[in-house]
Amino acid sequence: MKSGPETARAERHAVVCVMAACLLLFFFGFCEKSNLRPGSYLYAGAVILPLLARLSFRSALIPDAGKRLPLFLYASACAVTTLVLIYANGHSTALMLWLTLLMLGMWAVLLYLRGQLDDRRALALLIAGGILLRFIYVLYTDSVSRQHDVNAWGDFSGHAPYIEYWYRNGLKLPDFDVRTRWQFYHPPLHHWLMALALRLFTGCGMEYGTACEALQILPFLYSCLTLLVCVGLFRQVGLEGLPLLTAAAIVCFHPTFVLMGGSFGNDLLSVLLMLLSLLLALRWYEEPTLRRILPLAFSIGLGMMAKLSAWMAAPAVALLFLCALLRDRKNWKRFFGQYALFGLICAPLGLWWQLRNFFAFGVPLTFIPPQPTTSSQYCGNLSAARRLFDFGGGQLRYVYVAQRMYGAPYSDFNPTLGLFKTALFDAGVNGVRASVFPAITVTGPILFWTGTALGLLCFGAFVFMMARRDAGLDGVRRAFFTVFALTQLISYYLFCFAYPYTCTMNIRYCAALIPVFAMGLGLLLRRFAGGRLRLFCVGLTALFAVMSCVVYTQIG
């Protein structure tokens, strides 16, 4: 079924629409629940009412134009009542999310009854739900909750002091060995952007502490843009209909991207640019022109400038470069020219920071701060076989990340379990676990087992479909995704053995695999269109999305 012009126009300008939505939400509370005042709700009403008016009077749901005013009045009354309820219940973030999701669900039902719930509108509603879940999370999460290596503002080392360094010094490069200040070894792109935003906020008169918390607008924006890139990737491989919506729902409501959307670290920006590199590489392979290779070069280079691990997109992209060259060998000069320009852009952007520190202070190109072997998280004394294949000892009874230093009976040592646990609950001093948030005593394990089953299903579907010629992808594209997945997985497991600590076993080091494996499930659903398999996959995905919303409102 064809979409209307309004929906088509919104999709063409999806990035602008998402950025505008994030900006409008930002001014509701500057990404901090403690900033909510009566004026915040007046602002929300002033934003919502014009949007409702546009939806009502431009809506094809009501063919009779005379009935659109009552629709607007009814929707406005519901919106105002919702705002009053949220305010009266002490700015309840849970109420905020569930009432809004209820409205989105009602809108979907109305569209369905009118026969107008096509892919574009369903995707828009899913993305709206994902954005709202992320916003609720950043609203109740501050710069010290569920963070990695951030430390406190005004401290000596960590991501927050690294941002403050650039805030105070502009683009002046450190005149000291970056190894002497923890986390200062990271490439600076993410921290530059955060420092620039901090200057903007304080320059507009915002109090410094409030401005520091308001910086969550950037990772929140990265997380929302990741949704669009993933949808673009799914469409690039030909997913549509229910397979597309299933894969998109996994990314929209996956706790990993919710948690990373509130993080002050640089992981999410590198993941966003890495996924964008995959999408741009596939588009270049379809039409290998200079116009298409330039954005790809900038995407990988800037990804490495955010975090060096973005190099992991390079082997898969190199495979596409080789296949394109072999496919059109007669034009080898044109390809070599493109590849040379690609290297001239990508390599300096991605490596200048490491090379500068290497020549100035002797910092190894792949430097990672060492950890003491006396740490309670150290597991290097265990055999490789036990770390890889031992799933006993209560590891599956305790579904959260186990770390002795935070009161757990043991410290996790299995990298595979580390992936599933951190994907759903993350880790750290105040990570998501029932001992910190008793409300999730029942719902936490349900989310874990649902997410684990869905993760295994997506992984199995990916492997199965990449091995099949009838996957709907040619051999080059299947090899492309296989090389990327292997690069991520091999790098992750090697990292876990090179640095054998519980904190190393975290999904943030290979989060880009989540949408790639979700794509595998979409391909499986497209290949086997009917029957119980489809019902099971869609039902499991729906339960996963609901439980993700439940848990991440309970902890707020």
Image (cartoon, rainbow, N blue to C red):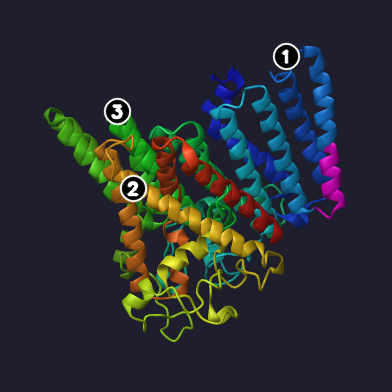
**Residue 547 sits above or below residue 157 on the image:** above
CB contact under 8 Å: marks 1 and 2: no
Residue at 58% x, 48% y is: 253
The amino acid marked with disc number 2 is Phe
For the N terminus, which image quadrant?
Answer: top right
> Mark 1 or mark 2, which is nearer to you?
2
Q: Where is residue 375 in the image (x, y as percent from the top left)?
A: 47, 83
Q: Which of marks 1 and 2 is nearer the N terminus?
A: 1
Tell me where the magenta segment starts and ends, as one range.
80-91
Which residue in the structure is indicated by mark 3?
A: 287
Location of residue 426 by image quarter: bottom right
Q: Viewer-proximal residue, 377 or 473? A: 473
Indicate whether residue 84 is drawn in magenta. Answer: yes
Residue at 76% x, 34% y is: 48
Seen in the image, is 440 located left or right of residue 414? right
Residue that sits furthest to the front in the current view: 531
- The residues bearing labels 1 and 2 have C-alpha atoms spaced at a distance of 47 Å
Which residue in the structure is indicated by mark 1?
A: 63
Disc ID at residue 464: 2
- The residues bearing labels 3 and 1 have C-alpha atoms spaced at a distance of 43 Å
Which element type, helix, strand or loop, lies under badge 2? helix
The amino acid marked with disc number 3 is Glu
Which element type, helix, strand or loop, lies under badge 3? loop
> Mark 3 or mark 1, which is nearer to you?
1
